[in-house]
Image (cartoon, rainbow, N blue to C red):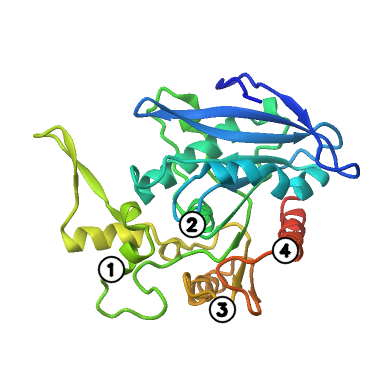
Amino acid sequence: MRYLFLVLSIAVSMQVSASDSLAFSKAEIIYGRKDGMALTMIMLKPTEKSNGKAIISVLSGNWVSSERMREVFPERTQMYIDKGYTVFGVTVGCQPRYTIPDEVNDLKRAVRFIRYNAKEYGIDPDKIGITGSSSGGHLSLMIATSDETVIPKSTDPVDKVSSRVQAIAVFYPPTDFINYGGPNTAETINQAALVFTGVAAAFDFKFWNDTTKTYATITDTKKRLVIAKEVSPINAVTPDDPPVLIIHGDKDVLVPKQQSESIIAKFKEAKVPCNLIIKEGGAHGWRNREVEEQKFLDWFDKYLK
């Protein structure tokens, strides 16, 4: 079934995945536009027993928001719906066309849009959690740690509300693009590794050339390094960050568990409530994550009171 794309209006269908699960309404919502394209998210709302709280699921892998993620999103979030959560599956403008800073800005916009429309969606604007896996986990951490400064001069009222979240739970996130796998005294970006893993376009940082009226790639090593640090959430940890739960496999060769260990150490230093669970034998993703997802649910229940 196709749904009508409207910014504030909602096209709804009723669905239920199992006899013992709560039914939910499903709607696709435009939360913003850029370059003539719509930025969309899926909202799944329990038709009864709503707890008035929201979970944002960042649909991203390799900094790509794929159609497959949208397809499996309802099934993978049923457990949250059964506990009364309204769940938003957010897609962002992604690589290869857009870079990580662009994706972070899109996600901030999504959080602001949800908060601005909280009353319409039947949720508390101060009880919003966020979750994601891999690059989705990284983007979630960027929201949790980055500056929530509003845009007061904007004519769009959405830009004048906070992009703050109140709890975060993520799987195996990249957190430090400079010290990836261990200390990097040379402070360089491993371009060969980016190409090998298929994420080079996400790091193809650009600037607007006002002379040629085109976007041009930033090739200056020092400038690229600055941006890479800015999109590494480990560098933005502060004491007012929301409670953080991370689950990471000890056999992950794509995103080393050092990435989670390092940022958790930073959170502890800042006295932010946090926990790191190491999945024994876990690679970069594994089947049957119900046990770990339950831990996420418990985390949100605890901190979105």
Badge number at residue 135:
2
Dot placed on the residue nearer the N-terminal end, 4 or 2: 2
What is the CA distance from the residue labelled 1 to the residue labelled 3? Answer: 22 Å
- Expressed as whole percent of the image width and height from the top left, the position of residue 301 reads 77, 54
Residue 304 x/y as whole percent: 72, 50
Task: Report the disc number at residue 288.
Answer: 4
What is the C-alpha distance between the residues marked 2 and 1?
19 Å
Q: Earlier in the sequence, mark 4 or mark 1?
A: 1
User: Disc 4 on helix, strand or loop?
Assistant: loop
Crowd band around label 3 with a 10 angstrom C-alpha radius: few (<14), some (14–19), many (20+): some
Q: Residue at x 46, y 65 (%)?
A: 174
Q: Which residue carries the number 3 mark? A: 251
Residue 76 vs 17, above or below: the answer is: below
Q: Residues within 10 Å of mark 2 (few under 14, many from 20)?
A: many
Q: Label 2 amino acid? A: Ser
Q: Earlier in the sequence, mark 3 or mark 2?
A: 2
Pointers 3 and 2 in contact (CB under 8 A)? no
User: Badge 1 is on which residue?
Assistant: 192
Instruction: Determine the CA span between mark 4 and mark 1.
Output: 33 Å
Which element is circle 3 on? loop
Q: For the residue marked with disc 3, what is the amino acid?
A: Lys
Residue under the image location 70 percent in, 24 percent down: 12
